[in-house]
Image: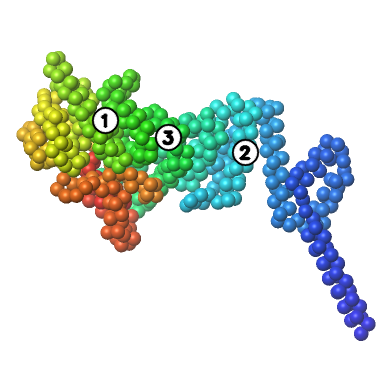
């Protein structure tokens, strides 16, 4: 009995002691910068009292979550100060430090929908704080930082998350180091162009061989997804910062995108830019016309760049919802007048009219005129006034001149242009077309079949782009032009069941079998 009583008393006393210990642990709280002050006083002044008490607390009292948070935050701050002191005292460490910091943007993680997780943003914020402090103390390191950002850009096959996270953080840097904004934009767009070109290359290869492995389709889908989310990040950047970044985008387009031929998606950043800023629209359309007409000194590769500029100008005037028809009329008039002046000039010279390289710019601008008349026929032939304007362009002279621009015009554009102008009795092209057909049987004819603003095919960023694009309306159909968004919505509603059940190989085969010639593609044939 006595033994049992002693055990009961001991148990009660132990519970009391445990309760008191718990209360003691609950009272342990660290204040902001308290740990830092204790460590500094111990290291600098040799005060061992507070330092010993800190060690005793850490050893005997379990630390709650809040204290751990304070402790880790102070350690991060102290490490940041250490890094800053290191590079300011010994600048030769800057390259290695910058490389290490930038590489942290490529850490593994999971893709996000709206925004990265709170923990990820906190980690990135710590890295950006250190970078900003270094550049603030040593301004010349901004050039070093930019070089490291370019060197460390992930390979496009690295996947969606590494590339998207890296682009996200480059945009973040541009916000606190605005002097690097244009270089960062150029670096991002250049990498997106590389992704876009590789997606196009694989797509072209698949048009010539039978798809045998779903793996091949998945590889293209991975590259497309990486480009898709990269486009999302840049589109959000343009929307968030507006004018300063939009102006930079115009400059980057002229330096990076315009000299590039054959890409299908990155140029839609420009369409988005001119859709939300009319000043940018005026600047871009005017510069494109100046380049196409040869009024800018663009140096080596001028002919290719002039032809590309003409394609961009025609595509933007035809496809962009926000470009008013007054601009369409203006540039159609400018292009036709330039072409007529060119014809007059060549009639006075002895140059070979069959040399398409010599007259390549003329052919490109004529093709732009034919493309716009065919694409925008619903507006251009909608009233007597507009019909009189079309007649004032003197299209028969362009078609029947000895330079023969229809000979190098893409067949789909030629057929549509011929059908439209014949229906309205503006010009008859059939005789010229038949003559060119006979010529093509004996000679190989090179057609320029790249139209930069054919329907946008990336599904995620497309939700932003599609409402800004006009869907091509076939000449034989009645009604107004519709946006690509409407066309895509109709297509998704029609084919939803099929694409939910079909394999990647079936989807690709269906897309290829229903393909429409470049220049007048609709959203009906872009779902893969």
Q: In the rendered structure, which disc, 1 or 3, sits on the residue that comes first in sequence?
A: 3
Label 3: few (<14), some (14–19) or many (≥20) C-alpha neighbours in 10 Å = many
Q: CA distance from mark 3 to mark 2?
A: 26 Å
**Compared with residue 314, is residue 496 higher up or lower down, i.e. above or below?**
below
Label 1 Cα neighbours within 10 Å, binned few <14 / some 14-19 / many ≥20? many
In the shown orientation, is residue 258 left or right of residue 148? left
Expressed as whole percent of the image width and height from the top left, the position of residue 466 reads 33, 47
| Residue under the image location 26 percent in, 24 percent down | 293
| CA distance separating discs 1 and 3 | 22 Å
Task: Tell me if mark 2 has few (under 14), some (14-19) or many (20+) residues whose alpha carbon lies within 10 angstroms of its own.
Answer: few
Residue on which disc 3 sits: 246
Judged left or right of residue 25, residue 182 is: left
Query: Can residue 182 be seen in the rendering of this structure?
Result: yes
Q: Earlier in the sequence, mark 3 or mark 2?
A: 2
Q: Please provide percent x and percent y for residue 72.
A: 70, 48
According to the picture, the residue beneath numbered tag 1 turns out to be: 310
Give the quadrant of the N terminus.
bottom right
Circle 1 sits in a helix, a strand or a loop, which is it? Answer: helix
SS state under label 2 = helix
Of badges 3 and 2, the one in the foreground is 3
Residue 414 visible in image: no
Q: Position of residue 354 (x, y in %)?
A: 14, 23
Report the residue marked by disc 2: 129
Q: Quadrant of residue 25?
A: bottom right
Q: CA distance from mark 2 to mark 1?
A: 45 Å
Give residue 252's position: percent from left, percent from top. 41, 31
Query: Relative to 100, is 26 on the left or the right?
Result: right
Q: Give whichever of 387, 150 is nearer the camera.
A: 387
Q: Residue furthest bottom?
A: 1
Q: Is residue 266 above or below residue 28?
A: above
Task: Say which residue appears at 21% left-offset and 31% top-offset.
Answer: 332
Q: Residue at x 88, y 71 (%)?
A: 13
């Amino acid at each position: 009995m006595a033994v049992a009583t002693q055990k009961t008393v001991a148990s009660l006393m132990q519970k009391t002691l445990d309760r008191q210990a718990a209360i003691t642990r609950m009272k342990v709280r660290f204040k902001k910068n308290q740990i830092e002050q204790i460590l500094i006083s111990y290291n600098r002044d040799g005060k061992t009292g507070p330092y010993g008490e800190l060690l005793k607390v850490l050893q005997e009292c379990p630390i709650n979550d809040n204290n751990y948070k304070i402790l880790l935050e102070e350690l991060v701050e102290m490490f940041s100060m250490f890094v800053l002191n290191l590079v300011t005292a010994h600048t030769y460490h800057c390259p290695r430090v910058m490389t290490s910091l930038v590489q942290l943007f490529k850490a593994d993680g999971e893709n996000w929908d709206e925004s990265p997780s709170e923990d990820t943003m906190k980690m990135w914020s710590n890295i950006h704080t250190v970078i900003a402090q270094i550049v603030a103390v040593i301004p010349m390191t901004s050039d070093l930082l930019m070089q490291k950002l370019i060197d460390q850009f992930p390979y496009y096959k690295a996947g969606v998350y590494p590339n998207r996270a890296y682009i996200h953080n480059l945009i973040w840097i541009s916000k606190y180091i605005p002097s690097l904004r244009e270089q960062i934009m150029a670096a991002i767009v250049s990498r997106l162009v590389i992704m876009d070109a590789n997606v196009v290359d694989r797509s072209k290869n698949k048009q010539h061989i039978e798809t045998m492995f779903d793996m091949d389709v998945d590889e293209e889908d991975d590259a497309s997804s990486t480009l898709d989310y990269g486009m999302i990040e840049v589109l959000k950047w343009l929307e968030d910062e507006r004018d300063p970044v939009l102006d930079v985008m115009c400059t980057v387009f002229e330096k990076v995108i315009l000299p590039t031929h054959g890409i299908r998606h990155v140029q839609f950043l420009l369409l988005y830019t001119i859709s939300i800023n009319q000043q940018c629209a005026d600047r871009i359309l005017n510069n494109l016309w100046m380049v196409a007409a040869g009024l800018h000194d663009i140096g080596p590769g001028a002919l290719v760049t002039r032809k590309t500029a003409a394609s961009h100008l025609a595509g933007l005037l035809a496809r962009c919802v926000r470009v008013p028809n007054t601009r369409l009329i203006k540039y159609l008039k400018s292009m036709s007048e330039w072409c007529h002046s060119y014809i007059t000039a060549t009639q006075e010279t002895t140059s070979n009219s069959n040399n398409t390289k010599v007259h390549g710019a003329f052919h490109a601008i004529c093709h732009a005129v034919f493309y716009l008349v065919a694409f925008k026929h619903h507006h251009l032939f909608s009233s007597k006034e507009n019909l009189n304007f079309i007649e004032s362009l003197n299209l028969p002279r362009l078609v029947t001149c000895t330079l023969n621009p229809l000979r190098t015009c893409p067949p789909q554009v030629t057929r549509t242009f011929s059908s439209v102008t014949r229906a309205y009795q503006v010009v008859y092209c059939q005789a010229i077309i038949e003559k060119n057909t006979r010529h093509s049987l004996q000679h190989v004819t090179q057609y320029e079949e790249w139209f930069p603003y054919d329907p946008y095919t990336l599904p995620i960023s497309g939700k932003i782009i599609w409402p800004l694009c006009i869907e091509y309306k076939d000449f034989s159909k009645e009604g107004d032009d519709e946006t690509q968004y409407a066309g895509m919505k109709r297509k998704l509603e029609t084919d939803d069941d099929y694409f939910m059940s079909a394999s990647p190989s079936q989807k690709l085969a269906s897309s290829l079998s229903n393909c429409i010639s470049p220049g007048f593609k609709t959203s009906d044939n872009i779902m893969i």
